[in-house]
Image (spheres, rainbow, N blue to C red):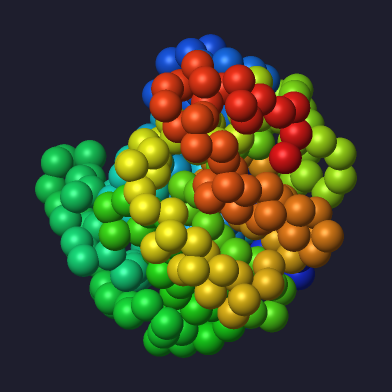
Amino acid sequence: MSRVEQIADNILVLSDVVPIDGRVSWLAPGAKGFEPFNEYLVLSEDNALLFETGVAAHGPSLVQSLKEILGSRRLAIYPSRIELDSIGNLGRILEEIPNTIVGCANPIEPTRLAHLRDWTTPRAPFTRFLVGSTLAEIGFPQLTVVDPVIRTLGTSWLWHEHAKVLFSADFFCNDMLTTEDQSVIRRSGDALIAPEGLRFSILQKFDWLELANKENLLPAWDNLFSRISPDVLAPVHGRVQFGAKLVAGVLEDYRKALFFFPDSAAASPPALAKATSVDKY
C-alpha cells in the first residue's frame, strides 16, 4: 500500500517513496536521500477527490490504498497536467474503481491520453473547469482552480480555501526525505535540497526560467500570494510543507531564488551553483 498521512481534516497525502539514485531527470545531479511521489485525497461524506494519479509503477499500491479509504464515496480525479506523474494511473483507476469521474482545467481531456489493459481508451464523465472556478460541480465547492505563475503543459493548481492548502502540482517539489521512513510532511527543521542550491534545483525542471523576464513574472507571483496565503504547500514530489510560518519562509526563499539571484549567477550552472549553494530554504 501507499503510505497515508493526514494533512488536515479530510485531507490525506498518499505517497510512494523511491531512492534518489540519478535516474530521475528532474532532480539536480547533487540531490540525495529519498523522493516521495505524492497524490492527495480530499474527502467529504459522499465524495472523494484525488489530485494526481502518480506514475504507473506505483499503480497497484495507490489503487489498494484508495479502495481501503473510499468506502461508498464516489471518486473524482483531478489531474493537474498531462505528464505521466499526473495521469500515469488514470486508466488503471478508471478500470478498477467503478463510477469514477474526471475533471481538470487542461485544454486536453486527460482520458484521451490514458488506456486500459486492452489498449482501449477509457470512458468516464468529464468536466472541464476554468481558472478561478470552484469544483462545486463535482462536489467540492471549497476547492478553486488556480493559474500557476510557473508552469508547463497547461498546468493548474488547486486551492482549498478552508484548510488553506495549495495543491501545487510539479512546483515546490525540491525538499527530499533524509530517510525512507521519514514523514512526508515537514512541520519543522531544515529542508533537504541538492547542494547546488534551490534555484539550480528548480531549473532542472523549469529550465525556461533561466531566460524568462523576471520583471514580468515577479508581479504575477506577488499578486498570486497576496490573494492566497497557504498554511500548507502540497506538491506532487518532495515533502509537504506544513504550518503558516514555515510556508511563509519557503515562499520567500523560492521568491528570492527565482527573482533575486545575482546576475552573474545566471551565466552558467557552475557559477549558479556557487552563488546559491544552501543546505536549507
Camera-side residue: 127 or 101? Answer: 127
Quadrant of the frame with the C terminus: top right
Percent position of residue 134, x then y? 46, 84
Quadrant of the frame with the N terminus: top right
Picture layout, residue 2 above or below residue 228? above
Answer with left or right where residue 270 lies relative to residue 104.
right
Percent position of residue 259, x then y? 53, 50
Confirm whether residue 92 shows in the render.
no
Q: Residue at x 60, y 35 (%)?
A: 198
Camera-side residue: 43 or 63? Answer: 43
Residue sitting at the far right = 188
Confirm whether residue 185 shows in the render.
yes
Picture layout, residue 105 above or below residue 94? below
Answer with left or right where residue 109 lies relative to residue 189.
left
Q: Residue at x 25, y 58 (%)?
A: 110
Answer with left or right where residue 189 lies relative to residue 160.
right
Picture layout, residue 170 above or below residue 128? above
**How many labels were placed on the picture?**
0
Residue sitting at the far left = 120
**Quadrant hosting residue 43:** bottom right
Residue sitting at the far front = 264
Percent position of residue 120, x then y? 13, 48
Q: Residue at x 50, y 30 (%)?
A: 264
